Image (spheres, coloured by chain):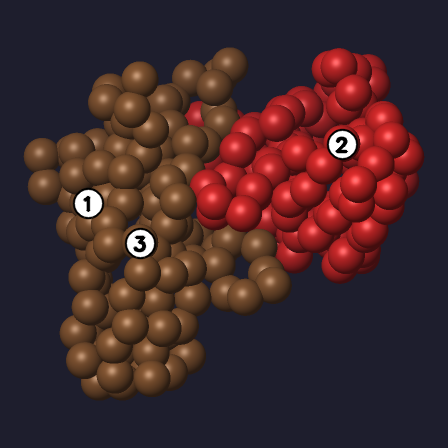
Amino acid sequence: AQKVTQAQTEISVVEKEDVTLDCVYETRDTTYYLFWYKQPPSGELVFLIRRNSFDEQNEISGRYSWNFQKSTSSFNFTITASQVVDSAVYFCALSEAKRGAQKLVFGQGTRLTINP
Amino acid sequence: EAGVVQSPRYKIIEKKQPVAFWCNPISGHNTLYWYRQNLGQGPELLIRYENEEAVDDSQLPKDRFSAERLKGVDSTLKIQPAELGDSAVYLCASSLEGTSLRGKLFFGSGTQLSVL
């Protein structure tokens, strides 16, 4: 069975601080996808990134970066120089990497609050 | 481009009453999902449609929940009768099949259901 664990329920930091959101996953699949989604107060989840299990290269997009380590089954998300607009609930998710298997299993989410 | 549209935004009903949620996915998206999100938790899949066919409804409580996607476009999720434990946010999402897009779901803002 697939499982995603986000141990941090809530994080609160002051603006401009760096913050890392942790994600640990469990799966028996040999190929899979990992995701991060953002849920702002408006409610709709917004796709941020997808990583394939065979691609362990870290990725950076502006102030966002992701660290994928297969050896520890982790896919952590770092926001550098955080801003108030980053305040949201962030979800890590996992799915099989095959056609027709688009069922995402989500973690419990981490509520991030950036204080001015 | 219009996003995923859901209605109503909020619904308050008494237990044992019926309720229905409506979803209009992004034009051209063949896959449609209904997720349920309990307070403080990540979304959990209820049902997934490929066009008008329900391809994964294993987590849909079929004794009281039903869904349909006529003509492979709009979808309706119904609960009859509602129970107190059904209080949650019901999220609709859509996506396009394709390797590069797999797992990239577009979500609506959800319907927040309160059962009293």
- Please, what secondary structure does the residue beneath circle 3 have? loop
Residue B100 horizontal side relative to residue B28, left or right: right
Identify the residue position indicated by label 3 in the image: B9
Q: Which chain is brown?
A: B
Q: Earlier in the sequence, mark 3 or mark 1?
A: 3
Q: Position of residue B56 (x, y in %)?
A: 35, 48
Mark 3 or mark 2: which is in front?
A: 2
- Please, what secondary structure does the residue beneath circle 2 have? loop
Crowd tier of the residue under label 3, counting other residues whose Cα lies within 10 Å: few below 14, some 14–19, many 20 or above: some
Say what amino acid the circle numbered 3 marks: Arg
The chain carrying label 2 is A
Residue toward you, B39 or A55: B39
Crowd tier of the residue under label 1, counting other residues whose Cα lies within 10 Å: few below 14, some 14–19, many 20 or above: many
- Please, what secondary structure does the residue beneath circle 1 have? strand
Q: For residue A58, which quarter of the picture?
A: top right
Identify the residue position indicated by label 2 in the image: A83
Question: Against B64, is B56 above or below?
Answer: above
Residue toward you, A34 or A43: A43
Residue B10 horizontal side relative to residue B18, left or right: right
Mark 2 or mark 1: which is in front?
A: 2
